[in-house]
Image: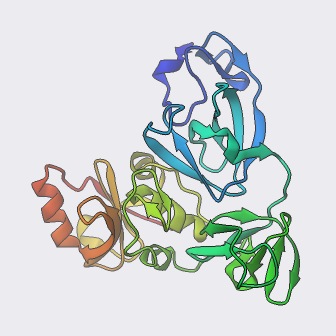
Amino acid sequence: MADAKTHDRRLTPARPDLAAKHLEGRVQADRFVEGEECEVIDPIAPVRREPSHDAPLETEALKGERVTIYDRNGEGWAWGQLHADNYVGWLPEFSLVSLRSKPGHKVIVQRTFAFPGPSIKLPPAEALPLGARVEIVKHENGFAITGQRHYVPAQHVAPLDAREKDFVAVAERFTGTPYLWGGKTALGIDCSGLVQVSLAAAGINAPRDSDMQEAALGTAVPVGDVKRGDLLFWKGHVAIARDGTTIVHANAHHMMTAIEPIEEALARIRAAGSELSCVKRMG
């Protein structure tokens, strides 16, 4: 039986002092607990490495996402595992509620406003990012009305099974978005977040981090045969090919999501000490 420390902490709800009940017999921990399923109520909820606002941002959970909570520290933080990509971390308790909605729709634009009534002149109740999930109870006068009685422009949401035809086009719409380690929205996004969110819009589930994506996604192809939709991987970085000569990627060099020539990126990243590790083709 393995010690909890030997497992990937990003994907395994196990610590030396506590672990998920379903891991009993597989990991060592002082105690095992049943989880409590919750939903994210805020538009964006940070998932942090430690229960502190100063702790590194690991990823973000979006409105409507499900998360199983295994621990609460009594100081406003809850430790659990996201259902969408199995990521484990600490979330603010105020971002979570007991299950209360049945999301059947998702936001399909970079960002939309939810209004407290049927008028775009009202101060928005919240701003929802691409991929946020909502329960729509009625359509009326150009609005989709949520279970919270928020009014969202009807053209900004679609059923959960709606699929973008070209995930690269989704990524391209993030051009100019500030770079944010752990980010997943138009307010800020990182390289693997851009890949995950763009693929999700096309109905493709992807792991959260670039090393996980390199291991799990696509089929390796020759570096000289890059086509639109291919994923280019370096150690700790991933980019999306727009065609055989350009890529779109969220990166700390530009501090934003940028489009640039593949050869230029290869040379710059090589100069920084990292070689391209592989090219993976989706589909």
* Residue at image location 68% in from the left, 80% down from the top: 156
**Residue 275 percent across, percent down from the top left:** 19, 53
Seen from the viewer's position, the closer of residues 114 and 65 is 114
* Residue 191 higher or lower than 226, as above or below: above
Residue 47, by quadrant, is: top right
* Residue 207 higher or lower than 255, as above or below: above
- 175 lies left or right of 68: left
Residue 247, by quadrant, is: bottom left
Seen from the viewer's position, the closer of residues 110 and 55 is 55
**Colour scheme:** rainbow
Residue at the far left in the pictured view? 271
Quadrant housing the N terminus: top right
- 1 lies left or right of 148: left
* Residue at image location 52% in from the left, 50% down from the top: 207
How many numbered circles are shown?
0
**Residue 210 percent across, percent down from the top left:** 40, 51
* Residue at image location 52% in from the left, 79% down from the top: 166
- 239 lies left or right of 38: left
**Residue 13 percent across, percent down from the top left:** 61, 29
Residue 161, by quadrant, is: bottom right
* Residue at image location 10% in from the left, 56% down from the top: 271
**Residue 123 percent across, percent down from the top left:** 69, 75
